[in-house]
Image (spheres, grey):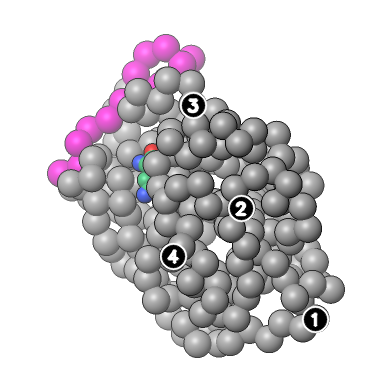
Amino acid sequence: MAVVGVLALQGSYNEHMSALRRIGVKGVEVRKPEQLHGLDSLIIPGGESTTMAKLANYHNLFPALREFVGAGKPVWGTCAGLIFLANKAVGQKLGGQELVGGLDCTVHRNFFGSQLQSFETELSVPMLAEKEGGSNTCRGVFIRAPAILEVGSDVEILAECPVPSGRPSITIPSAEGVEEEVYSKDRVIVAVRQGNILATAFHPELTSDCRWHRFFLDMDRESHPKAFSALSLSSSS
Ligand code: GLN
């Protein structure tokens, strides 16, 4: 039976645990480095990435998390979890927050604005239909969400979101990292995959749609086929 860890320091870990239960998978809450041993994969939930980083530091989790990602085990970051996994984060008084890294991208915290600018929208995600048939859209729940400004060549873009009108303008570092410029594109990247890493700026765990969790389990199955011999995935979403 596959064992999926859920980093349970802060944020929406309960909702991920429930989503895993709905698809018949055992989730294990992770708060300490030793609890990563024996896990097949890991979900890093949304929440507040500065707070989560402080708690991760307190529990000395960063080295173990980096080792887990570096070992090629599947890891999925949602929202603050995406920020954790990015190689580079910019925006809004970041102040040198520690990251796990591994995902070759630049992420902008709070890209869409404050809590008041949180929103839901329908996202086009062709990969979901390719995997499961049916609809190629999903509900994107964006809560003080980050967005991905740039990705490396190994990163597959799974979903983009139109930039909502009325979003407060933001500045991002120029290539030299000194001057600033306003992000002016009308779409922004909100879901990506790079090998064993999946990252979404939105929160599938806050909807009843389990397709993202099943997709992640498929990544897990590809990397640990034996762990899944006893697992039959329910197809209900
Ligand atoms: N804005 C939050 C952060 O910077 C992330 C929000 C979320 O995970 N819903 O950590």
How many residues crowd mark 3 within 10 Å: few (<14), some (14–19), many (20+)?
A: some
Q: For the magenta stretch, what is the residue range?
A: 166-180
Question: N-terminal of the two: label 3 or label 4?
Answer: 4
What residue is pinned by disc 2? Answer: 30
Question: N-terminal of the two: label 1 or label 4?
Answer: 4
What residue is pinned by disc 4? Answer: 15
Question: N-terminal of the two: label 3 or label 1?
Answer: 3
Tell me the element at label 1.
loop
The amino acid on which the numbered mark 4 sits, given as a three-letter code, is Glu
Residue 168 as seen in the image, left or right of residue 198: left
**In the image, residue 189 above or below residue 56:** below
Please say if the residues under marks 2 and 4 sit with CB atoms less than 8 Å apart.
no
* Image quadrant in which you'd find residue 178: top left
Magenta span: predominant SS is loop
How many residues crowd mark 2 within 10 Å: few (<14), some (14–19), many (20+)?
A: many
Please say if the residues under marks 3 and 2 sit with CB atoms less than 8 Å apart.
no
What residue is pinned by disc 3? Answer: 97
Q: Give how far across and how far down residue 73 sits, in percent.
A: 74, 54
What residue is pinned by disc 1? Answer: 229
Pair 1/4: label in front: 4
Question: N-terminal of the two: label 2 or label 4?
Answer: 4
The amino acid on which the numbered mark 1 sits, given as a three-letter code, is Ser
